[in-house]
Amino acid sequence: MSENYFKKYPSKDGFYKEYGGAFVPPVLEKEMKKIADSYFTISKSHNFISELRSIRKHYQGRPTPVYFCNRLSEKYGGRIYLKREDLNHSGAHKLNHCMGEALLAKYMGKKRLIAETGAGQHGVALATAAAYFGLECEIHMGEVDMKKEHPNVARMKILGAEVIPVSSGLKTLKEAVDSAFQSYLKDPDNTIYCIGSVVGPHPFPMMVRDFQRIVGIEAKEQFFDMTGELPDNVVACVGGGSNAMGIFSSFLEDDECSLYGVEPGGLSLKKGEHAATMTKGKPGTIHGFKCYLLQEEDGQPQPVYSVASGLDYPGVGPEHSMLRDINRVTYDSVGDKEAIDAFFELSRLEGIIPALESAHAVAYALKLAGEKPHTSVLVNLSGRGDKDLDFVIDNYGKDYQI
Amino acid sequence: MRLTNIFNNKSDLLSVYFTAGFPELNSTISVLEALENAGVDFVEVGMPFSDPVADGPTIQGSSTHALNNGISLKLLFEQLEEAKKRVSFPLILMGYFNPILKFGVERFVERCVECDIQGVILPDMPYEIYDEKYRHIFEKRGVFPIFLITPQTTDERIKLLDENSSLFLYMVSSSSVTGKSSGNNMQQLAYFKRVAEMKLKSPVMTGFGISDNKSFKRVCGYTNGAIIGSAYVSAIKNSVDIESDTLSFVKRIRG
């Protein structure tokens, strides 16, 4: 049955019902088709699969464990489990699709990888993949995010990537995408744009999802091994939605599993103070695809904000947009404050410092566990929090006796 | 004046793109008057969008500026209704799809008709999606899309777009964004020749990277004329006298 779902979505032209597609200028149109064709032929080849499997095991350190949170469950109720993507090499789930995309780039004979990054996790992962395959790497990052996430900027530079500061607009993720597109258009022949999430024109949402499916495939088996059943609830944070698609994809057809996508509620749900796309957005097109979009009356994207740089994007993956419409996934939001609380709770009760992005999913899981104490909750802990330490201490340290 | 008449009666056409609501919110009409007085053949009025993926820094900058000035589609149509009384050369609109989607595609086309807009260039709207979902809305009212072709577009696709064009084809001079110099290489020449030899039924206008008399003359040798955007936007960016700056700009291009 699940094969059916993946054969059906996306359609040949990259649509998930009305969402997705490739709304791109002709220069990109041709390039996208080329990447899609290569993806379909190369990524299904025996050599490609063997090489990627070997990388997953020996380089990334997969499978990452599923871990039962003893003290957290005791305090909040329920049975809380974490899929430990923070233990994936380079500290987040992002490397799963970066290694896939870079391997594809190598097979296609590309010389250079280019991408945007929000929190820097995708940038670090891509710089890592570039180093592994000996490719050039150019990462576009908003100046605001560069300041906030400077450890990741340093990591990218150490890994040999060129980091391009983006100073237009709000100087965050959306502008970084614009800037990366521009640079990509200058030399599409030698470059591949490795978009950082399940967003952008077809085939990217599909490719990134497929490379992230490893998370769900492992988690489902591991959880079953540990408990003899499937999780009652699966929770993941959603900015563009790559880690969420990764874990959800294995449970979409298990109706007994409730799936929750957690968006950043920021300071409040007032315009400009959040990035809760599903809660407040309307269908629209941005960056070459159709999705729920936070937009003004006249169709311009709205300014967005979240404490988690990796989540503040006015759009969301097209597949998520569809999953919302067909009511398969429940999308809800968690604000800055709850996310920071969860960040400290997980750190102090379990000794695991989560990324601020992932802390949104943890916060929602704690709430769910309280509401449904006799159920199990599997959280995709998509990244580790090392990059956020200075920011959290400077801005919230006092509230937590630091 | 209809666009088709212009193509039938004249060569070495000069078309100019400018961003609506730039440099001032109400510049739209004065810029149009200046362009007509300077002898520009027809104009593309840019509908600003905050994330214009096909445009370089110049037009990105003017778009952001115009949006900050408060331009919107609704306001632009009001300006165009006024402009229609003052200028008579053909106008087409150019911009990204989302503001139109939000405005309502039918309402958008209706407003185009009311404002005498003959065609639209939607760089992020692929032909297939237009054909499947929106074609009937546009054709019913006689507003026609202008499709872009690039050096990578295959002959087969160029033919398809040619057959489905009612106004002209927009030949993008290189695989790049607007406002980049188009270079002078053999590859580009081969592309120009390839398209010229296809003997298309539609007129062809060349755009992207044309900024002076030399580049204008060059593309006129192969196609019906040229579209200039970024160079003009830069020319009026800090202008205190748009009328005379436009005149000297056009003189410089035409040579």
Image: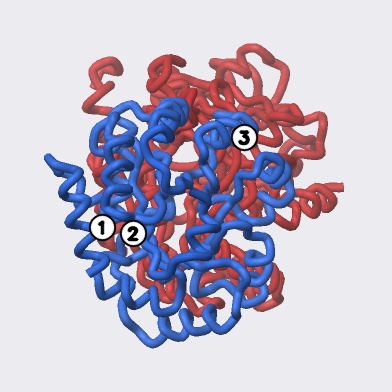
Q: Colour of chain B?
A: blue
Do callouts 1 and 2 mark residues in contact (Cβ within 8 Å)? yes
Q: Amino acid at mark 1?
A: Ala
Give the label on residue A341, or none: none
Q: Position of residue A46 (x, y in %)?
A: 71, 76
User: How far is disc 1 from disc 3 in space, using C-alphas?
Assistant: 31 Å
**Which mark's residue is nearer the viewer, 3 or 2?**
2
Residue A8: % across, % down: 80, 50
Quick one: SS at disc 3?
Answer: helix
Of all residues shown, which one is farthest toward the left?
B240
Badge 2 marks a residue whose secondary structure is: strand
The earlier-in-sequence mark between 1 and 3 is 3
- Subunit of label 1: B
- Determine the residue positioned at 57% across, 16% down: A367
- Callout 1: 10 Å neighbours few (<14), some, many (20+)? many
Quadrant holding the C terminus of chain B: bottom left
Q: Residue at x 28, y 48 (%)?
A: B37
Give the percent coordinates (x, y) of residue B18: 33, 47
Task: Check disc 1 and report its element: helix, strand or loop.
Answer: helix
Badge 2: few (under 14), some or many (20 or more) residues near its Cα, within 10 Å? Answer: many
**Colour applied to chain A:** red
Identity, as a three-letter code, of the amino acid under mark 2: Ile
The label on residue B228 is: 2
- Callout 3, which amino acid? Val
Circle 3 is placed at which residue position?
B105
Q: Is residue B27 visible?
A: yes
